[in-house]
Amino acid sequence: MIDYRLATPADDADLRRLLREQAMPGWVSLTMTREPDYFAAAARPPGQEWSVIARDDATAGHTAVGMYHCRAHAVHWNGAPRTLGYLGGLRVTPAYRHRLRVLRDGYASITRLHAPPAGGFWFTSIAADNHAARRLLEAGLRGMPRYTPLDAYATLAISRRNARRHGLWQALPANADPPRAENTAQWQALCDFYNQHAARCQLAPVLTPEWARASGARFHGLRQGGALQACMALWDQRAYQQVRALAYRQPLHALRPLYNLYARCRRRVGLPAPGAALAQTFLAFFAASPRLDISARALVEDALAHCATPVLTLGLHAAHPWLEPLRQALRATAYQSWIYSVSFDDPPAADGRPAQPEAALL
């Protein structure tokens, strides 16, 4: 019998092992790890996160065979703030992966073990080339939640070799204790600006000064004529969670050293060694006024000049007008995925806005 229960710090080693060993398939098998402490990432803002671990009680030692985590936080939906849940970290060991009952019981535990988010449904992301998982989850099988595709999504990985200083971004003042009034006003203005533009997309987070400051991200603004015209944050999360390339398909595995020589010459992102973490910083909470007379390329080039890691990562919906110009001009590597709503009854009504959750929160 498989037992599903809320995870505690006593499960830390098993949770980290499941993340480390169960990769998402593709031309590169990626795994999202949380080293050295699984719950260090879970405790960070925004919202509230909880994890579920599945153990086979029929085995010696009650072997951990699966897991998932949920994070409920405020996002924009149809232009208004709504608390929804992100469903992520779904991992099942190979011996149990094709047992439909294991999946059904796992999904049933989502609503059994914790109250649903106030907004009533979940969302998730699945790699575009994970065709087996997408076919299964879109099939509408009895006892399974309804996965409704919302939008294609691209995560761009950009080499810091494309950096060019334009003197555009200014860092927000650091935290003070107690907060100074002028600093508080700047943080509030940045969050208001971001939320105004983020509301044009489904699932973009609702940013507040409190969790922006607590996140550890370095926030920047761009002003013209005394008014805020763009914002972004540089968010290096490697101290508590990482993206690792577990393996590459052939012939790429054999050709990786040659490709990395080519990538260095062409200012592209190199391929890390199997098992190594990608040294990346997220370009997060990126928004710009349509009145801004500065190109997206210049904004990203200047952000790269402030970046402390070799790779800068940015997520955009597939129809975003910046996507192709940035991919081509900055020689970005694009990792394709799909964003889904996940519901246990009727799918949510969407008003046609593109879905663009924040890549740093997926």
Image (cartoon, rainbow, N blue to C red):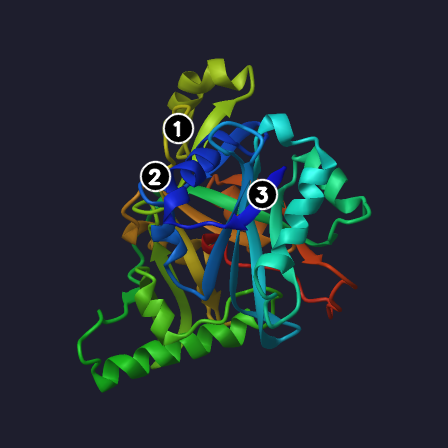
Q: Amino acid at mark 2?
A: Ala
Q: Is residue 221 visible?
A: no
Using the image, tell me which numbered label, if any, was put on residue 127: none
| Nearer-N-terminus badge (2/3) | 3
Instruction: Estimate how packed mark 3 is, as few (under 14), some (14 to 19) or many (20 or more) residues with alpha carbons within 10 Å.
Output: some
Instruction: Estimate how packed mark 1 is, as few (under 14), some (14 to 19) or many (20 or more) residues with alpha carbons within 10 Å.
Output: some
Q: Which residue is mark 3?
A: 3
Residue at 42% in and 24% down? 274
> x and y percent of residue 348 in the render?
73, 66
Of labels 1 and 3, the one closer to you: 3
**Which residue is at the front of the view, 283 or 37?**
37
> x and y percent of residue 191 in the render?
41, 75
Residue 75 in the image: above or below residue 298 = below
Q: Amino acid at mark 1?
A: Pro
Q: Whole-Å distance between the Cαs marked 2 and 3?
A: 36 Å
> x and y percent of residue 55 in the render?
54, 38
Q: Which residue is mark 1?
A: 272
Q: Amino acid at mark 3?
A: Asp
Of labels 2 and 3, the one closer to you: 3
| Nearer-N-terminus badge (1/3) | 3
Q: Looking at the rendering, in which quadrant would you find the N terminus?
A: top right
Q: Is residue 59 left or right of residue 319?
A: left
**Quick one: SS at disc 3?**
strand
**Which residue is at the front of the view, 109 or 311?**
109
**Quick one: SS at disc 1?**
loop
Residue at 45% in and 53% down? 360
Residue 19 in the image: above or below residue 198 = above
Please say if the residues under marks 1 and 2 sit with CB atoms less than 8 Å apart: yes
Q: Whole-Å distance between the Cαs marked 1 and 2?
A: 9 Å
Instruction: Estimate how packed mark 2 is, as few (under 14), some (14 to 19) or many (20 or more) residues with alpha carbons within 10 Å.
Output: some
The number of numbered discs placed on residues in the rendered structure image is 3
Q: Which residue is mark 2?
A: 279
